[in-house]
Image (cartoon, helix red, strand yellow):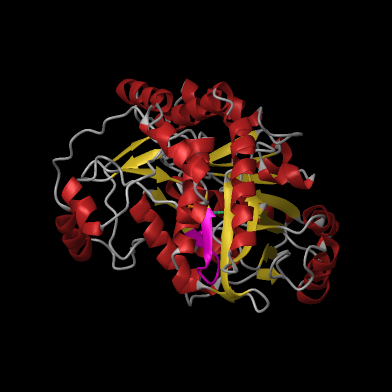
Amino acid sequence: MTGSLAARLVLRRSPPSRLHFRREVSLPAAERRREGVALVKELPAFGHTPTKYSGISRDEILAKRREYLSPSIYHFYKNPLQVVEGKIQYLYDEKGRRYLDAFGGIATVCCGHCHPEVVAAIVEQTKRLQHSTVLYLNPAIAEFAQALASTLPANLKVAFFTNSGTEANELALLIAKLYTGNQDIISLRNSYHGNAGGTMGTTAQSIWKFNVVQSGVHHAVNPDPYRGLFGSDGEKYVRDVEEIINFGTSGNVAAFISESIQGIGGIVELAPGYLSAAYSIVRKAGGLCIADEIQAGVARTGSHFWGFEAHGVVPDIVTIAKGIGNGIPLGAVVTTPEIARALTRRNYFNTFAGNPVCTAAGLAVLRVIEKEKLQENAFVVGSYLKERLSALKDKYELVGDVRGRGMMLGVELVTDRQLKTPAKDETLHVMDRMRELGVLIGKGGYYGNVFRITPPLCFTKEDADFLVDAMDYTFSRM
Ligand SMILES: Cc1ncc(COP(=O)(O)O)c(C=O)c1O
């Protein structure tokens, strides 16, 4: 009987809260004894042996970070994790210990770490031509642009590539202002759209906003079904957009920008009916609708390739990054040919954007998603994972809400369900304990009390079980 099958039998026999977890066999025995971990359950079997790490130590890295890197850079976990290798849905530390990656480098690794076909596309393109700028013709950018357009509805077919999500949103805001001749932007409270001049203005959480001038943006009441004033009544929240236009602007706006599921804000789904109603009000005021698909796009939500599709809307501009490059710096603004023409009034240029290596990677990502049916997997395994996480809500008062779609799920912890008091310390504690058990999850939300579960889209049902059992085990011991 294999180890993982034995673990599954143990699972079936014992109630989840009494599970014991087996630390990875690669964890030195002495360390396992020292930590006194009862050894029963293992990570799902995986046939990859990491290369022996011979680089500088964890302490040396920490010292160099302290001396040579910006003090603004922070890390997860009391005891920071060193990651030296990745393979599909797993990460390895310097001792060769394997971790289940349920954060995906912040919803970025969609095909899996170092997916062989994405790596091959990058390596082959790098060997042939790494950089040339768009001033010369190259097939990679043209082929990728066509493939990307084929995933989008209506006339959303013209791309401008960027190096990041922030750049994509900055450009989308600029295009909207140029095209409409208007200046005012509306974004949602609790959103995150980037950290440069314009995008920091649209971002609406004080923890991500520096005290510098950020003008011309109005932040609408967030249609948050869990914490919002009107619960899941999307239509009621829309009145605020109308009031912003009527009382805060000339009556005309340049754009409305929103995520279809707020990521950094704590996996907040927009109340049903909100987005389509907001789009029509904004369009009446002359504005364009921008869908920030930087986290929710590229098959992550499972039910659809793009998050906005679940809301039954077609945006005027779509911004894309993160998953489309599977870790390679690649972003895009896609819009209609007519709107795109606004950018021809002056020269607009970006040295690295759309470079052959990144666009070759992007094309490989789209091919892998299709070939390996990753959208379907995100839907099937994501729905199963959500169901299992939701069962924890019935079991533990600490779990206030479970939400999201596909491989973009959130678990909000509260110390009081009525008052929805954020359980910030508990969130940190559970994250730390789950890391010890071999599972990496993210956190977010304005109060830092929401687990963000955004694994590579190839996450398996066994991975989902391991994650939930580890969370269950941790909650049961608090
Ligand atoms: C929804 C959303 N938009 C924009 C951005 C900014 O992207 P980047 O960090 O690549 O600049 C992020 C980053 O997390 C994001 O989650």
Total of numbered circles in the picture?
0
Give the side of residue 282 with respect to residue 85, left or right.
right
Q: Is residue 311 above or below residue 85?
A: below
The one nearer the camera, 422 or 108, is 422
**What residue lies at 13% left-to-right and 40% top-to-bottom?**
54
Residue at the extreme front: 13
Q: Which residues are magenta?
A: 443-452
* Quadrant in the picture for the N terminus: top left
Q: Is residue 274 above or below residue 291?
A: below
Q: Is residue 359 magenta?
A: no
Q: Is residue 448 magenta?
A: yes
Residue 260, horizontal then vertical, whole percent: 67, 52
Residue 437, horizontal then vertical, whole percent: 37, 52
The one nearer the camera, 124 or 272, is 272
Q: Is residue 51 above or below residue 275?
A: above
Residue 187, horizontal then vertical, whole percent: 67, 63
Give the side of residue 277 with respect to residue 464, left or right.
right
**What residue lies at 76% left-to-right and 73% top-to-bottom?**
229
**What residue lies at 71% left-to-right and 46% top-to-bottom?**
308
Displayed quadrant of residue 114: top left
* Quadrant in the picture for the C terminus: bottom left
Q: Is residue 231 visible?
A: yes
Q: Is residue 109 visible?
A: no
Residue 132, horizontal then vertical, whole percent: 38, 30
**What residue lies at 65% left-to-right and 44% top-to-bottom?**
318
